Image (cartoon, rainbow, N blue to C red):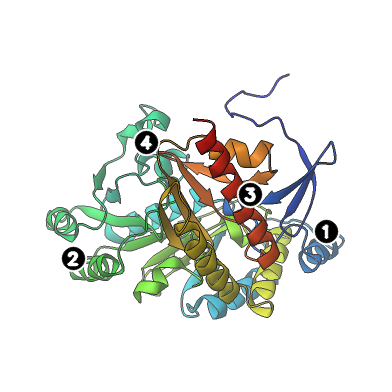
């Protein structure tokens, strides 16, 4: 049996990792400035994280949600404290797409409505409901298009209000920062107005913080820079530092009913142990403040480089928008300088390194990028 061939794969197989470094099967060392799609939050194989997983695996790795699991409550308590949402309830699942699916389902239960407002260029996942609210027809099957979704331009409150006045909207769903689209943050003023509009029209506001959460922007969640409180927050990626876990932070306004949501693997013992270790490391090593400081330095240095049109984002979620005459910079960084970065639309490079990235590693990346830009210019 062969694998279902749906990925464009680099001919690189990582077999070992530590901190912000990765080694392939040939022994080549790479600097990780992508964190595997923003998943590696506290660094690869952090000792505290490894110990937590090993210890838990030696006790019990899994049992179903038909029995009590005190690790779930420990995770909920620590997440509430560190995120600033102690009064919210936590529902645990396995991934970002599943988190968004459950958020939409919960909002629809709550309102009795089914139409969703999402935003152009949004990406919310690849499962049925999540891909329906993703603005990319190329990955939507005819089945996915059966959902009722209205896509609106970002930062246009008038367009949102016009749709909300129709009275049939179950939820408004927005990313804390649009990642796949090329790192576009909604304006703080727009988020505040969006919050006010949703409250006025009694419509739940869902913040997708799957890529932009867990300290990546310098705040625990990106939307906190605008000073708003959504009704539901979805999270995943950095939550488990590589172990699959996702979750919903749910406002007290939502009433829980037995059986309305459910999952087989969500909130299992190993996943909770991993997520608890992540929160403890983020707090004890002050990684949110570190992400803010390093991100500011990176953005400042990148903005001064020739060949870069714009640098967008916050903290360690940055989009480097290159001029058209500088294509394939990511390839140059990967194969000549051995640095992983991420891609996005329109010649944009995404930088999503572990929050523990050090100054020396940041300077190494900047020096390599400068060389890649010079080489690209000279080859014209």
Q: Earlier in the sequence, mark 3 or mark 2?
A: 2
Residue at x-position 54% and y-position 39%: 329
Q: Nearer the viewer, mark 3 or mark 1?
A: 3
3D distance between C-alphas at marks 1 and 2: 47 Å
3D distance between C-alphas at marks 4 and 3: 33 Å
Please provide percent x and percent y for residue 249: 47, 67
Q: Is residue 153 above or below residue 5?
A: below
Q: Quadrant of the N terminus?
A: top right
Name the residue carrying label 3: 368
Q: Secondary structure at mark 1?
A: helix
Q: Earlier in the sequence, mark 4 or mark 3?
A: 4
Q: Tell me if label 3 and label 2 are in contact, CB under 8 Å.
A: no
3D distance between C-alphas at marks 4 and 1: 39 Å
Residue at x-position 59% and y-position 28%: 8
Crowding near pointer 2: few (<14 within 10 Å), some, many (20+)?
some
Q: Tell me if label 4 and label 3 are in contact, CB under 8 Å.
A: no
3D distance between C-alphas at marks 3 and 1: 40 Å
Crowding near pointer 4: few (<14 within 10 Å), some, many (20+)?
few
Residue at x-position 54% and y-position 53%: 351
Q: Secondary structure at mark 4?
A: loop
Note whether residue 176 is visible: yes
Between 244 and 219, the one lying in front of the other is 219
Q: Secondary structure at mark 3?
A: helix
Name the residue carrying label 2: 201
Name the residue carrying label 1: 57
Q: Nearer the viewer, mark 3 or mark 2?
A: 3
- Tell me the number on the disc at residue 136: 4
Crowding near pointer 3: few (<14 within 10 Å), some, many (20+)?
some
């Amino acid at each position: 049996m062969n694998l279902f061939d749906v990925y464009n794969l680099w001919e690189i197989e990582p077999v070992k990792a530590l901190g912000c470094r990765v080694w392939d099967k040939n022994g080549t060392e790479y600097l990780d400035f992508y964190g595997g799609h923003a998943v590696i939050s506290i660094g690869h194989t952090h000792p505290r994280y490894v110990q937590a997983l090993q210890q838990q695996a030696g006790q019990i790795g899994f049992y179903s949600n038909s029995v009590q699991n005190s690790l779930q409550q420990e995770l909920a308590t620590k997440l509430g404290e560190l995120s600033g949402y102690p009064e919210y309830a936590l529902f645990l699942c396995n991934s970002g797409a599943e988190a968004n699916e459950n958020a939409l389902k919960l909002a629809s239960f709550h309102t009795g409505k089914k139409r969703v407002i999402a935003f152009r260029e949004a990406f919310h996942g690849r499962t049925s409901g999540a891909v329906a609210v993703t603005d990319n027809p190329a990955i939507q099957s005819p089945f996915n298009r059966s959902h009722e979704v209205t896509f609106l331009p970002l930062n246009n409150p008038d367009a949102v209000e016009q749709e909300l006045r129709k009275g049939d909207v179950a939820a408004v769903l927005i990313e804390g920062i649009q990642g796949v689209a090329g790192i576009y943050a909604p304006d703080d003023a727009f988020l505040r107005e969006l919050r006010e509009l949703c409250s006025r029209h009694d419509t739940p506001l869902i913040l997708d913080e799957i890529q932009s959460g867990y300290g990546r922007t310098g705040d625990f969640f990106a939307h906190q820079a605008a000073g708003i409180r959504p009704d539901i927050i979805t999270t995943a990626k950095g939550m488990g530092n590589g172990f699959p876990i996702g979750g919903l932070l749910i406002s007290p306004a939502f009433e829980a009913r037995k059986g309305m949501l459910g999952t087989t693997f969500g909130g299992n013992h190993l996943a909770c142990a991993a997520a608890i270790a992540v929160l403890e490391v983020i707090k004890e090593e002050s990684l949110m403040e570190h992400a803010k400081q390093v991100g500011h330095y990176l953005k400042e240095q990148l903005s001064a480089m020739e060949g870069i049109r714009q640098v967008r984002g916050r903290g360690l979620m940055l989009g480097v928008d290159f001029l058209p005459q500088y294509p394939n910079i990511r390839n140059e960084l990967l194969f000549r300088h051995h640095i992983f970065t991420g891609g996005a639309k329109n010649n944009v490079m995404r930088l999503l390194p572990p929050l523990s990235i050090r100054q020396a590693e940041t300077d190494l990346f900047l020096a390599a990028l400068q060389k890649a830009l010079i080489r690209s210019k000279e080859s014209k």
